[in-house]
Image: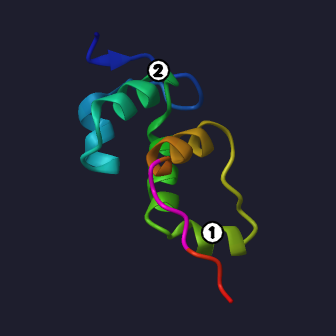
């Protein structure tokens, strides 16, 4: 598997496995492969990481919803997290 993949979108730089780990932290190889296959931009990774840490709630309240590849990356990053119990 090549270390760097071409990136579509506004950034012309390639996103590497190292870039991914620097931005989102230590994740399993299956998630790395799935995310890199989408060819995200660095901005996509950064935005998904913000939302995955819970800071996306602030952005959503400001009218900035998560969309596109960033939303797909977020789904992969949080796929195995448990849903919080409903409030009563």
User: Could you classify mark 2 by the number of other residues whose Cα lies within 10 Å: few (under 14), some (14-19), or many (20 or more)?
Assistant: few
User: Which residue sits at x=33%, y=38%?
Assistant: 20
Secondary element at image label 2: helix
Q: Nearer the viewer, residue 25 or 14?
A: 25
Nearest to N terminus: mark 1 or mark 2: 2
Secondary element at image label 1: helix
User: Main SS type for the magenta part?
Assistant: loop
* Residue 56 in the image, given as x and y percentages of width and height: 57, 66
**Whether residue 14 is situated above or below residue 21 in the rendered picture:** above
- Residue 42 is a magenta residue: no
User: Which residue sits at x=23%, y=34%?
Assistant: 18
Specify start and end residues of the magenta stretch as a single range: 80-84
Read off the residue under disc 2: 37
Labelled pair 1, 2 in contact (Cβ < 8 Å): no
Read off the residue under disc 1: 59
**Whether residue 42 is situated above or below residue 84 in the rendered picture:** above
């Amino acid at each position: 598997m090549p270390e760097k993949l071409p990136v579509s979108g506004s950034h012309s730089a390639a996103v590497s496995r190292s870039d991914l780990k620097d931005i989102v932290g230590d994740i399993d190889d299956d998630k790395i492969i799935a995310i890199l296959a989408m060819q995200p931009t660095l901005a996509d990774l950064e935005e998904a990481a913000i939302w995955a840490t819970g800071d996306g709630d602030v952005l959503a309240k400001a009218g900035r919803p998560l969309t596109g590849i960033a939303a797909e990356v977020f789904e992969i990053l949080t796929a195995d997290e448990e849903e919080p119990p409903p409030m009563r």
